[in-house]
Image: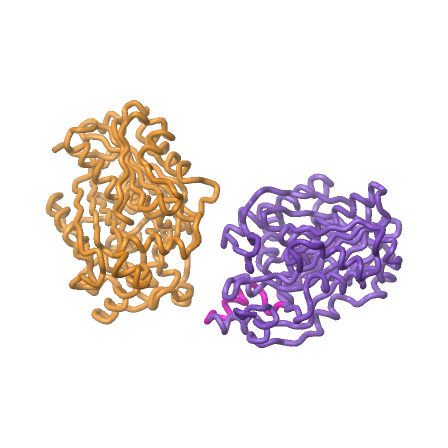
Chain colours: A purple, B orange
Amino acid sequence: MAGIVGYGAYVPKYRIKSETIAEVWGEDPNRIQKGLGIMEKSVPAIDEDSATLAVESARIAVKRAGISPTEIGAVYVGSESHPYAVKPTATMVAQALGAIPNLTAADLEFACKAGTAAMQMCMGMVDSGMINYGLAIGADTAQGRPGDALEYSAAAGAASYIIGKNDESLAIFEDTFSYTTDTPDFWRRAKADFPSHGGRFTGEPAYFKHVQGAFNGLMEKMGEKIENYDYVIFHQPNAKFPYAVAKKLGVPKEKLTAGMLCPMIGNTYSGNAPLALANVLDEAKPGERIFVTSFGSGAGSDAFSIKVTDKIEEKRKSGYLLSHFIEDKEYLSYAIYAKLRKKYKGM
Amino acid sequence: MRKVAIIGAGMTRFGERWDKGFRDLVTEAGTQAITDAKLSGEEISAGYVGTMASGSLVGQEHAGALIADYMGLDPIPITRVEGACASGSLALRQGVLAVASGLHDIVVVGGVEKMTDLDTAAVSQILGGAGDQEWELFMGATFPALYAFMARRHMHEYGTTEEMLASVAVKNHQNGAKNKYAQFQREITMEQALNAKMVADPLKILDCSPITDGAAAVVLAPLDMATSYTDKPIDIVASEQASGTLALHDRESLTSIDAAKIASQRAYKKAGIAPQDVDVAEVHDCFTIAEVVATEDLGFFAPGKGGPAALEGKTKLDGEIAVNTSGGLKATGHPVGATGVKQVCEVTWQLRGDAGERQVKNVETGLTHNVGGSGATAVIHLYKRGY
């Protein structure tokens, strides 16, 4: 199967603390922090959107891949906050990278898992020989209705993967498996500013069912077991669900630690599992194995079994680690956050 | 008038039943009750079903015909009965009247509500219709607010405390933890109850019954025919109903529900028993304060003593009188139309000795107390073993 030739991740500089949001809505900050496990979340700057975040992360990925952007045969951008309803983010990204014009490009949407869907598409195209390199991106500046529980988690970030042949790869895809149904747990209608969700319905019949379905499906397909993996990533809509599903599946929680970003940056939606994978690749050693399960409302999960190769250490050096962006931060007041996220009526 | 007995009881698991629709729930409960009574469908001659707001909650009116159709009971008549949260007990009372009068022999009684298809705000608005739409709901008074008024006044007049209210929730969760049909099969601590999120001061989230899907059903027969179906018929020794003012502000007292007092006094008189004779009581604890008020209105404790009694454990499974052995509305859940019938199922199982881990010893007499709105309808039934 195909592999990861280069990767890059980016998180905006601004943060807002859960307690700052809780104060505005008269909520108990301890209850929020304990309930969701989110201490702060990333906030995009006034001049950032999903396209710019995608470009920031893609530049690092291309550099790590050590290829010319013109060698990229496909760009797929997964997001639920594409800047335009009609007009692709993928073309903006391709142009900014200098990958034009001999390539195919398109935008994807599948709530929080369009990024991993993009990875699977590139894997298929590389394996079939259609392209040499594909660029798969998960990028979002997620929206949460003011005062809604999602406001504590909806964050911004992006991760990019150059998918290519496995002999050039810093990590190879051993296998993938998806689990998908029509389950309306979270949605945003056309022209609506903010998404709606089914409260607790987003849990058991949505997140847990699909994550477990994909995880068990891939384990069964490969005849594998969790003991053979060094790192495990589950989609992180909050910091509680991934630990809860790990417990159900018998995954030791230590295996989740390296990929656990939600407490520090919130839920980056399409960027979620891809960013977590980037953080794991930032520390993984050759020969180590990673099991990733994404989740997108609506609903579906993609699971991947990934093995790190001896090219990881050399390639890692040529770009910023994700921790660089996570640690470089500036806190916002709610008033400034509300301005940046265009929450003032009349803006 | 003939004596009327319960010959079968059944219910669904209560909870967020995203896996089941309105018709699935009521059919499941009805089938269980009929199976429990060892009946065949042809023997049933009528049915009554309580549902408060199926039209608003799931868009389905005409529940009687739907049930007849989906349970394969057509062409027998099935009638929907509505009295807000007391709809289930009202359906039972219609069944009792039909059998007692000699009009019908075997009658099935159900209660059902499917509530979790809508969000909390929409459900609160719909439930508000159980009060006075023009004078209460329209002015912003939802049910948590109305019961909070009652709680505040009870505290003011009698010194009832938040701990006393919380102890009701703690006890009902203890019982619910032993009930496989309950929405919340887990215990809570006093600390959790007292520190829970505020809903309508002094009522916190753990003082409130939840939004629930579920259904329950029982089968009635004349007592003198009952033993041909079951060895353990349950005799309904009193069925009383009373009405009060629709709006809370029109009551003389906020610390008592007159309709419940009047209906229970009539029921005790009819059955020739005293409040102290009751061994198990399922009461309408839509909020913790409602259980405190109920235990006073029913004469189990003097006015103002319901709170201390709860705190002292007098209403626990092994207390002076076991109240809400099922877990009550608080822990079993409150699918409004189903609640009254669920109460009957629980008392039936307690009297038969079929209540498992939560079985109370030596149960001779049971009571159900089902209230609509803030007390505008109250329905009391008394039960004894019919064998």
Note whether A66 is above or below B118 in the view shown. below
Magenta stretch: includes residue A36: yes
Q: Which residue is nearer to you in this view: B131 or B92?
A: B131
Q: Position of residue B102 (x, y in %)?
A: 15, 29
Asked if one can make out residue B318 in the rendered structure from this viewpoint, the answer is no
Q: Position of residue A134 (x, y in %)?
A: 81, 51
Q: Position of residue A93 (x, y in %)?
A: 77, 59
Q: Position of residue B36 (x, y in %)?
A: 33, 31
The residue under the point 58% across, 68% down is A342
Please give left or right for residue B118 compared with residue A19 in the image.
left
Q: Where the C terminus of chain A falls, by quadrant? A: bottom right
Q: Which residue is nearer to you in this view: B199 or A298?
A: A298
Magenta stretch: includes residue B321: no
The residue under the point 52% across, 69% down is A345
Q: Which span is picked out in magenta?
A: A26-41
Q: Where the N terminus of chain A falls, by quadrant? A: top right
